[in-house]
Image: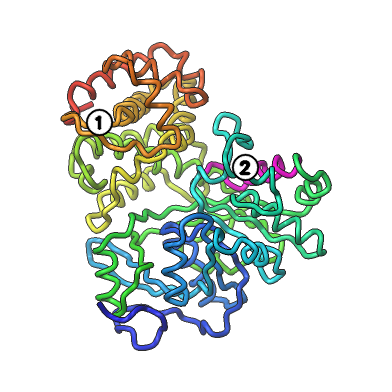
Amino acid sequence: MSERLQTLSGLAPTAKLPAYDRSRLKSGILHLGPGAFFRAHFAPFTDGALAADGGDWGIEVASLRTPDVADNLSAQNGLYTTLIRDTSGTTAEVIGSILKAHVAPRDPAGLLARLEDPDIRIVSMTVTEKAYGFDPATGGLDLKHPDIVADLANRHAPRGVIGYLVEGLARRRQKGIAPFTPLSCDNLPSNGAVLKRLVLEFTSRIDADLHRWIEANVPFPSTMVDRITPASTEATYADAERLTGRADMAAIETEPFTQWVIEDHFADGRPAWEKVRGALMVEDVSAYEKMKLRMLNGAHSLLAYLGYIGGYEFIRDVMDDAALAALAYRHMHAAARTLDPVPGIDLDDYANELIARFANKAIAHRTYQIAMDGTQKLPQRLLEPACEALAHGDRAETYAIAVAAWMRYALGEHGNGERYELRDPRAAEIAALIADVPRTGPAISAALFALPGLFPSALTGHRAWTQDVSDKLEILIQDDRLPLF
């Protein structure tokens, strides 16, 4: 193995390097959750903004849970490689915008000190939907979430993302420091509005004055991020080493396409992200977000469930099945019919672009990875648009296929009896609901339609549609080699 990536000197000429002087950077952003998604979009966009316009917008990252990524970044002085893969080959870009990495459980006081530092003007996050501690049924605070319970009981020693944000803002208010801007980049609909509601509901329970101050002074811009980012593999690390000449245990891989739509509401400045290809600063992100959730993410989930139960490891393999590729295209157009016009976007062109991205042979995006956390993803990707489609007289057939595929996946076993882990925050509830239920479409669908808080009454009360789901689930139970729909 080569020596570790730690400096920008002596790297292979095949690596693209940051186009700015790292030694002159200061931290202006603290990012919570430095996973692959962050390293594939937020940090490269900030790298581009620094190259185009400069500024004190270096990034510090903090892991609220496992230390692996933060430790790898620390060992590499914040440097890592982004591999961009398509059918023409793989290119490598070394990202330099990360200046320091923290591990919150090891040093919570250190993270709180960074949150109250006036140099930190943006606190961004990619912590996954389930880390926010919200109740999908109400959209508000989940008072049973372990982090919310712990942080309400001991607000000055937080462990969850809401607790850290609130304590950081409280300390700034107490010291007369301007607030930072909390910036959610997770795949949550109206993620900024959701984050604001959770923070305000939390503060309403602990400090009325802080609640009013946050409501009056802290913006919560919503964002929409789109870039397919598979989990890193040994091939990722091997290619990063080949193209940079250095070992890189923080390397990630992604596709050429990248899009980031950001509401331009910030308390104390921001990087010049609009100068980077793919970034768009807007007044309201909702139309773009709904387009992505329903057309891209909805079709992705459909393909992931059908693909995984059908024995396909990667989305690119699913797309080799002409019938499934056609089904994905049909679903995208069904989803498009539920959308209002999206400024600057032709939805037919967008669907064609998505099909090409899904079929990219250079991207190994596992169906099992996309299938995880279904109860968190189904509502905004599939269930809400299905309700709207039915209300407008559409049969919503592709939505019935997708839900039936999720239900088949929720059985937790392949057709040959081999078991697999469901990887869902409600996996135990799902298992309990179907434990003693006959393995038939009508019985399983009835049990899962009763999962509390998941399926809206507009769906469960629509007899023709639930029958369609039941019929399709029966087919999938009988033949997991994917009969054609």
Please tell me the numbered disc located at residue 147: none
Residue 33 horizontal/vertical position (percent):
51, 57
Mark 2 vs mark 1: which is more N-terminal? 2
Q: To which residue does mark 2 refer?
A: 148
Nearer-the-camera pick, 372 or 65: 65
**Left or right side of 38 for 220:** right
Identify which amino acid the numbered label 2 is placed on: Ile
Which region of the structure is painted magenta? Answer: 188-204
Tag 1: amino acid: Glu
State the mark number for residue 413: 1
**How many residues crowd mark 1 within 10 Å: few (<14), some (14–19), many (20+)?**
some
Q: Secondary structure at mark 2?
A: helix
Number of residues whose C-alpha sits closer than 10 Å to that of mark 2, classed few (under 14), some (14–19) or many (20 or more): many
- Along the line of sight, which residue is nearer the eye, 156 or 40? 156
Vertical arrangement, residue 269 with respect to residue 222, above or below: below
| Residue at figure coordinates x 27%, y 37% from the top left | 420
Q: Is residue 329 visible?
A: no
Quarter of image, res 269:
bottom right
On the picture, is 60 further left or further right than 35? Answer: right
Asked where in the image residue 245 lies, by quadrant, the reply is: bottom left
